Amino acid sequence: MTEMLKNPTILAHAQSETDRVIGRDRRLEESDLPNLPYLQAICKEALRLHPSTPLSLPHFSFVECEVEGYRIPKNTRLLVNIWAIGRDPNVWEDPLEFKPERFLSDKGAKIDPLGNYFELIPFGAGRRICAGKLVGMVFVQYLLGTLVHSFNWRIADGEVLNMDETFGLALPKAVPLRAMVSPRLVRAAYE
């Protein structure tokens, strides 16, 4: 939500998409999600730029091996820096910019965050991938879609958006988002 409030045209585009697909006379349902590609792109972009955990679960090599020309000794513990992959300029054009459109092009549309494309692995990959990855993606899309579709959002006058994150095992915002909301749907949709 913070990224969309920082970039109001992205929020307006997402609301336009939900209005076109769902209308304003009912709330978002899970079955609507496959018909909301821009919302899906926003979620992918948010997971790329703001992964919930900066480092993957530890991986362990039982035998010596070579990966991309690097020798990995036997009994090595490896942590993958998911945060750095999402910001790598060798992988992403304008990596620090929040651009959901990057996931709508031919190449980007194929990238999913479910461990199949190593440039976007917020849930990890391989045998150590998060068991709840599918539920996690549906939850993120449903929650964000509901907030975008059901409410108008704005920053209070004089309020400054703080994008800082607290670094640790997880990456929560250092300063919680404060925003003003108002209903967008017909009154009966909220009952």
Image (tube, helix red, strand yellow):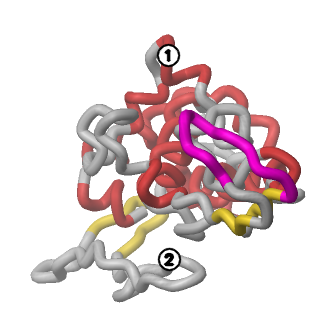
Q: Upstream in the sequence, badge 2 or badge 1?
A: 1
Q: Could you say which quadrant of the image residue 89 lies in?
A: top left
Report whether residue 1 is seen: yes
For this rendering, which residue is in front, 16 or 86? 86
Position above or below: 177 against 81: below
Q: Is mark 1 on a helix, strand or loop?
A: helix
Q: Badge 1 is on which residue?
A: 107
Identify which amino acid the numbered label 2 is placed on. Answer: Leu
Residue 28 at x, y percent in the picture = 69, 47
Asked if the stretch drawn in magenta spans residue 118, the answer is no
Left or right: 49 with respect to 90?
right
Q: Could you say which quadrant of the image residue 24 lies in?
A: top right
The circle drawn on residue 171 is 2
Magenta region: which residues? 62-72
Residue 140 at x, y percent in the picture = 66, 57
Left or right: 6 with respect to 116?
left
Q: Residue at x 25, y 78 (%)?
A: 162
For this rendering, which residue is in front, 41 or 69? 69
Q: In which quarter of the image is the C terminus?
A: bottom right
Residue 160 at x, y percent in the picture = 17, 79
Q: Which residue is drawn at 33% across and 39% down?
A: 99
Q: What element carries label 2?
A: loop
Q: Quadrant of the N terminus?
A: bottom left
> How many badges with numbers are in the image?
2
Q: Which residue is drawn at 35% across and 55% down?
A: 4
- Mark 1 nearby-residue class (10 Å; few <14, some 14–19, many ≥20): few
Left or right: 7 with respect to 49?
left
Q: Residue at x 58, y 67 (%)?
A: 55
Left or right: 26 with respect to 23?
right
Report whether residue 18 is seen: no
- Mark 2 nearby-residue class (10 Å; few <14, some 14–19, many ≥20): some
